[in-house]
Image: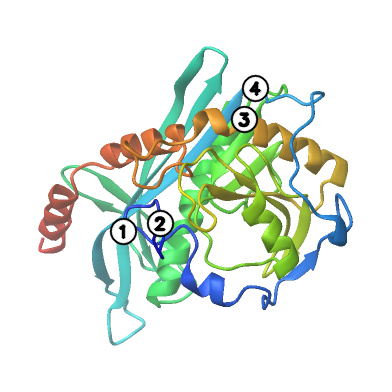
Amino acid sequence: MTGFTVDPWDPGYAAALAVEALSELGATSAELVLDIERPAADWKPVTPGPGTSAPETLLVADGVRRIDARVWVHDPDTPMPVPGIAASYAAGIVRCGPDGADLAAIDVHRSLISASPYTPEVKTAHAAYQPVKAADASFEELSLALQRQVTQLEVDLAVRHRSGSDDLLLVDGPLRGRTHLPRTVGYIKTHHAAYLPAPQSAVVAALGPGQRTPVFLMGTSWRRHAWYVRLPVRSPAPWAGIARCEAGADLDPSEVVRLADAVTLALPPLAGVDYKDPRAPQNLVPIGGLEKLLRHHLGDARLLYRALRTVALG
């Protein structure tokens, strides 16, 4: 046997488990309550029992964003123009059921984001950008303001397209900003921090395909229930095929356990395959397909950039 393992993800992407997370194992400052489902000292891989089942309908929601141009907004209240961004973003939902998957909805928006109260609506020959107010002029805040727009668009789509029955909504990324949605789980593919202490982290590494960890409660800048699940994977790399799932902190633990079992059963058939997707298996087939479609719907970035410059030059 060789003395190294190749991470299964394409090197163009960050590793599924960041090196920083490995080095900080057991040193997280996150609030943790480990005995939600079973005592912390008795953690072991969980296989959903015969009395559990995958949801009949799984809705998969995702959003994409792109900065089309950096802009300057001329503000009569300040001697210097205020920086901003012109951005395109889109969200969509795929409905997965017994008969396969189909596209439920796609929505595309464009915004001009700036801290200036004078941020204008910009109409170009190809698209219109609606003004959005940011808290300050830093690029970090402009980016956060854009992400809030994407999250809200996903929420609006989810509200419009829920069946009101026992469907389950899986959102790509952390659940923050969407914890109020019923029967909703956040799905995180990449691990930038190792939240669990070493004994419980070892349980994550010991998971087999289709197994999960016990549910726990975690808090950083916000609180949520969480668990880890392993998807089918051939690689022996650390945490290969591991995804983290999140559910609202205000849910009853028994409800979270039911959600965790349902998601653990639903995910393996949707796992990405490595010859098609460099982030397989965590980048689920519906997510990969939806991301590609959403980016296509954003339109040609060079065309939009030229159109924005044409309007700016008058």
Please identify, in this view, whether the residue under mark 3 or under mark 1 is nearer the observer: 1
Q: Which residue type does callout 2 highlight?
A: Asp
- Label 4, secondary structure: give it: loop
Colour setting: rainbow
Secondary structure, mark 2, is loop
Q: Which residue is at the front of the view, 236 or 20?
A: 236
Q: Where is residue 94 in the image (x, y as percent from the top left)?
A: 48, 28
The numbered disc on residue 163 is 4
Horizontal arrangement in the rendering, residue 78 relative to residue 22 (left or right)? left
Q: 157 or 42: nearer the eye?
A: 42
Question: Pointer 3: what residue?
Answer: 266
Q: Which residue lies furthest to the right in this view?
A: 39
- Disc 4 and disc 1 in contact, CB within 8 angstroms: no
Q: How far apart are marks 1 and 2 (CA)?
A: 8 Å
Which is nearer the N-term, disc 3 or disc 1?
A: 1
Which of the two discs, 4 and 2, sits closer to the camera? 2
Q: Against 110, is 80 above or below? A: below
Label 2, on which residue? Answer: 7
> Which quarter of the figure has residue 76?
bottom left
**Foreground label between 1 and 2:** 2
Residue lying at the far bottom of the rendered structure? 79
Q: Is residue 92 visible?
A: no
Image location of residue 85, percent across then percent down: 31, 64
In this view, the residue in front, 125 or 40, is 40
Q: Distance between the residues labelled 2 and 3?
A: 25 Å
